[in-house]
Structures are given as C-alpha cells and as structure tokens.
Amino acid sequence: MLDLAILGLLHESPMHGYELRKQLSTKLGAIRAAISYGSLYPTLRRLQTAGWITEAGETPADDADVPPLTSRRGRVVYKITAEGKERFQDLLAQVGPEAYEDAAFGVHFAFFSRTEVDIRLRILEGRRRKVEERREGFREVLQRAAERLDAYTLELQRHGLDAADREVRWLEELIANERSGRTPPPRGSEGELRPPTPRSTDSAPPLTARPGPDDSAE
Amino acid sequence: MLDLAILGLLHESPMHGYELRKQLSTKLGAIRAAISYGSLYPTLRRLQTAGWITEAGETPADDADVPPLTSRRGRVVYKITAEGKERFQDLLAQVGPEAYEDAAFGVHFAFFSRTEVDIRLRILEGRRRKVEERREGFREVLQRAAERLDAYTLELQRHGLDAADREVRWLEELIANERSGRTPPPRGSEGELRPPTPRSTDSAPPLTARPGPDDSAE
DNA sequence: TAACGATGTATCGGGCCGATACATCGTCCG
DNA sequence: CGGACGATGTATCGGCCCGATACATCGTTA
C-alpha cells in the first residue's frame, strides 16, 4: 500500500525521504495521517532491494573549496527504475477486495489520473458496494438494537450511518461522471477543466464523507 | 486503546472472546473495522497477566453422564476484576493528545455514559481543535496549491475538507449540548426539518462526518 | 451424509506507528 | 555574540494491530 504510493510519487519526480513524506501527507491527507518514518525508510530500503527504485546521488553541484569542513550531507535522493514503473502499473491495476479498504481505496484514487477508465470504474463500484454494506450495518443496529445501547453509542451509529450514506452518494456522483466520459484531466495537462468550481468558498461543499481510517481506520 | 474498549465491555458483563469481538464491532463500528483476533487474544492475555481481568470458568451446568465423549469445550469467559475497574476509570480520565486521535476518540466517546461531564467536554473540545486543524490544512492546499494537483487529488481534498467541516459542526452540537446540562445527546429536536421518518429510509440524516480510521487507509 | 456457515480459540509474519536519537541550517532575540 | 528554536534530514526500535491460517464443534440445509 505504501509501495504503491511511493512508486507513484517517484514516478512524477525523484525525491528524498523527507520530501516524499510531505508530499504523501498532502496527497493522501484526506485518507490517512502523515506516514511515519518508521514505515517510510524501511519501505524505501525494501523497494530498493527489490530493484523498483535506486539512489540518484544528489548531484552536489560541486564546489571545489568549501567541502572539507562538513562531510558530504546525508541527503539521499531516490528515483524510480523501469522495473519500478512496471511494478507501479501492476499495483495500480490490481483490483482485489483490499483495494476497497479505506486506506487502499484512497491511494488508488489518488492515482486515478494514471489509471484506465475501466479500472477506475471497477474500483469506485467495489468501494461503493463496501460502503453500502457498512451503511446497512448501521441501519440494522439503529433499527433493531436501539433500545439496548446508550445514547452516546447511538449517536456514534448515526454518525457512521450519515458518513457512509454521504460517501455512497459521493461515489455515485463520481461513477456517473466516469461513465459520462467527462473524466478529469487525463494527465500532464492541468489546465482548468472545471470552470464552474461550485465549491471553493462554500461552507458546505457537496460531496464527501470520510474514507480514512481509519482507521484507520485507521 | 483496545485495553480501554475491552475493560469497558467486560465492565458491563462477563464475556468470552468471540462475543467480545462482536460487541466491539457494533459498538465501535463507526470508528474502526472489526478488531482482529490477532489483537484480541494477545490483549486478553496481557490484561489477565496484569490482573485487570480473570477467567470465570463457564459454569458447565454439570452433567454426570455425557462428558467423557467430548473433552470439555474451550469456551473461556472473562470477567473484570476490582483492579480492572480502577484501571478502566484511570484510562477513561486519561485525556492526553492521543485521546483526540481518530480511533482513541471513538473509544472514549463510546464510553461517555461512564465519563464525568468535564472530561467529556475536554475530550470533545480537544477533538474539535484537532479536526479544525485538519480542516485548515485542506483549505490551504485547496487555495494555495490547487493548480499543482490533478483533478482526482483535488477531489480527495474537497472530500476531506467537507468531512472535517461536518465533523467540526457535529462536535459543536455535542459540546453545546453538554454545556446545556442536557447530558445525553438530544435527538428529536431536529424532527421538524423533515417531518416524516427523520432517518430510517431517508438519504440524508443530520449530523456526522467520520472519525474512524483509519484510514486507513488500511 | 456431506457441505456449509456460525461459533469458538489461537498463532504467526509482517506492516505501520510513535518515540527517540542525532546532525545541519537559518533566524530570531536577548 | 551566543543560545534557543524550528525546519530539514536520515535512521532505528519496541510494540500494537492486522490478515491469513489452522483447528474444532454444532446445527441446518441439501
């Protein structure tokens, strides 16, 4: 899961660990909290061993007189290899039930611009089914066991029901949009394809509900 | 975190592992996915070693003639000890920054009926602050870096922004309610907005946004 | 009678997190 | 001038928790 995210980012441009973490945090911020270095560095080493990425020696811009004082800085820049790109495509297209999980779904979604439209649809629909099941679970609890639970637990259930319901509707919009052929920018061109932007300053944007964690998730 | 949840459930009544897992799933369903046995059983053993819980031997209802054929079934019922109850209260009142995390917040919330009002308020406010920060993060990304991100990533950000925004409002309602002295969550006051069946078959219940998980991004 | 799904306990490998350590750099402030 | 601080940067370690797996019993269904 981290593999996919890291390969995806390095596919866009070479980077060192720290930068990688920052970009992951903003790109996947809606999905999972900032990824820990305790995950990041071991994963980088694993990817390197597997041959998906390599170190790309920082190109020190070479200065002839200053160097002796501070020994070469420890900045390690990674870049993706040809095998890494293949691996990335494999992972992208690998649509198992895990891809509908909160975090994994988010990562797949974040790289949708690099994904074929039919894969996108399969993932969105799988995710929808999963969230629908979740939602029905909440409904059942609320209808059948309401009197056996305390007020706060019930509130939590309503909370969950509403979130699931919203996410289903969000997914439905996205699915409809994909089917209509009007898909967001294919790649490389990030000119504004969304002139209307109906939600910029709005207090209550249309879509949503939270995949994360979720949660952890988690 | 699991400790708190397990002690809380066993505080209500003795139970065996399987049952514990089921109850946790419904009680915390909005927060985290079903807890794994790979977490549950080791945790139970840890709690037992610490003396917070004990085995309460299943009271086999004793039959004199049937036993020899099948050796005693392996059902292990656990019950909380006096020390366990103390521990539970300690954990409940322990309001560190961790308690504002998605999963931990959910667990604390689920046991709010056993928590003092002032603790409840502190947790709700801490959580609110945390989610507000999250929300501002999304806003900044959307305002300052919108043109550097692809359409799907942007959609994810809006998603997150909306969810965070909703959760903040949810928390605000809960906080206001706590302060008003009307301890348990309100319910019923929002009825007039949509007269027939507030949320049973309705597509859009009132509150929410999702605390759980992580995310997870699994 | 065989298959299946629910109930039930348990372990193992591995992913990921939080805490921590350490080092450099620029800036702010006394 | 010097020290504190925060951002940048790499890295490890202990531990929580998950998913997969194994195994066993029971009742229902085919």
Image: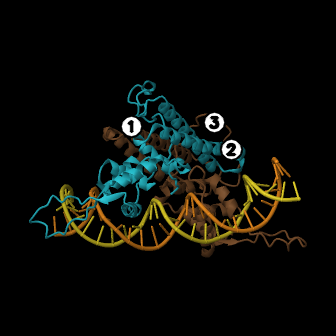
Chain colours: A brown, B cyan, C orange, D yellow
Taking the view exactly as shown, the residue that stands out farthest to the left is B65
Q: Would you say the residues marked 1 and 2 are in contact, meaning their CB atoms lie under 8 Å apart?
A: no
Residue A198, numbered circle: 3
Q: Position of residue A5 (x, y in %)?
A: 60, 60
Q: Residue at x 30, y 49 (%)?
A: B13
Disc 3 element:
loop
Which image quadrant for residue C11?
A: bottom left
Q: Would you say the residues marked 3 and 1 are in contact, meaning their CB atoms lie under 8 Å apart?
A: no
Tell me the amino acid under the disc marked 1.
Ala
Q: Tag 1: Cα neighbours inside 10 Å, few (<14), some, or many (≥20)?
A: some
Kindly report the distance in space between the C-alpha atoms of the residues bearing marks 3 and 1.
37 Å
Letter of the chain that mark 1 sits on in the rendering: A
> As displayed, is residue C21 above or below residue A139?
below
Specify whether disc 3 shares its chain with disc 1: yes
Disc 2 element:
helix
Which image quadrant for residue A1?
A: bottom right
Tell me the amino acid under the disc marked 2.
Glu
Q: Nearer the viewer, mark 3 or mark 2?
A: 2
Q: Position of residue B195 (x, y in %)?
A: 41, 25
Specify whether disc 1 shares its chain with disc 2: no
Q: Would you say B25 lies left or right of B56 here?
A: right
Give the residue pinned by disc 1. Answer: A151
User: First in sequence: mark 3 or mark 1?
Assistant: 1
> As displayed, is residue B141 above or below residue B68?
above
Tell me the amino acid under the disc marked 3.
Pro
